[in-house]
Amino acid sequence: MGFLHVCLNVADADAAADWYVENLGFGYSWEFESGGTRNVYVADEDGVELQLSDTEGEDEFHEGTGVDHFAVGVDDVDEAFAAIDDHGVVEEPGDNNAAGARTAFLKDPDGHVVELVEPLE
């Protein structure tokens, strides 16, 4: 048993996939369409996937209370934070000594909160 993927509802699956590939180093995995919903998958280097789903006519999403954010490991939080187009800074880079990591939080183009994590040495 292992973690396979997270599904995010997005306005444009192709544009969202491009953002994750260009800014966070994910790779394109596969895609399919079913019942008017297009699903594009991107994967990290370990094969864990992010499913990006768009449904025609749905382009506004509201933050729910069940999912707060998801985390992505990066080599350098400050560098990644500076390079990513700002769609909404939630928290500037800073050390979280209790977690043993340097972190930052930002929003992707559809408003999902993404945590950038770099282990402290």
Image (cartoon, rainbow, N blue to C red):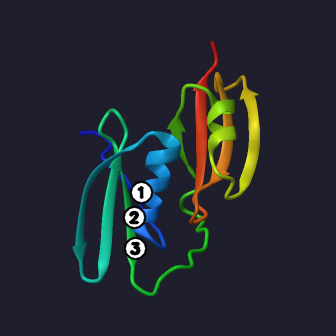
**Mark 2 surroundings within 10 Å by alpha-carbon count, few (fewer than 14), some (14 through 19), many (20 or more):** some
Residue under numbered circle 3 = 54
Q: Are marks 1 and 2 in contact (CB under 8 Å)?
A: yes
For the point 59% across and 33% down, the residue is 117
For the point 69% across and 53% down, the residue is 86
Residue 98 spot, x, y in % from top left: 69, 25
**Residue flagged by tag 1: what amino acid is it?**
Ala
Give residue 88's quadrant in the image: bottom right
In the image, 106 versus 97, the foreground residue is 106
**At numbered mark 3, what does the secondary structure look like: helix, strand or loop?**
strand
Instruction: Tell me the number on the disc at residue 17.
Output: 1
**Residue flagged by tag 3: what amino acid is it?**
Asp
Vertical comparison of 9 with 44: above or below: below
For the point 61% across and 26% down, the residue is 76
- Cα separation, mark 3 vs mark 2, equals 9 Å
- Cα separation, mark 1 vs mark 2, equals 5 Å
**Mark 1 surroundings within 10 Å by alpha-carbon count, few (fewer than 14), some (14 through 19), many (20 or more):** many
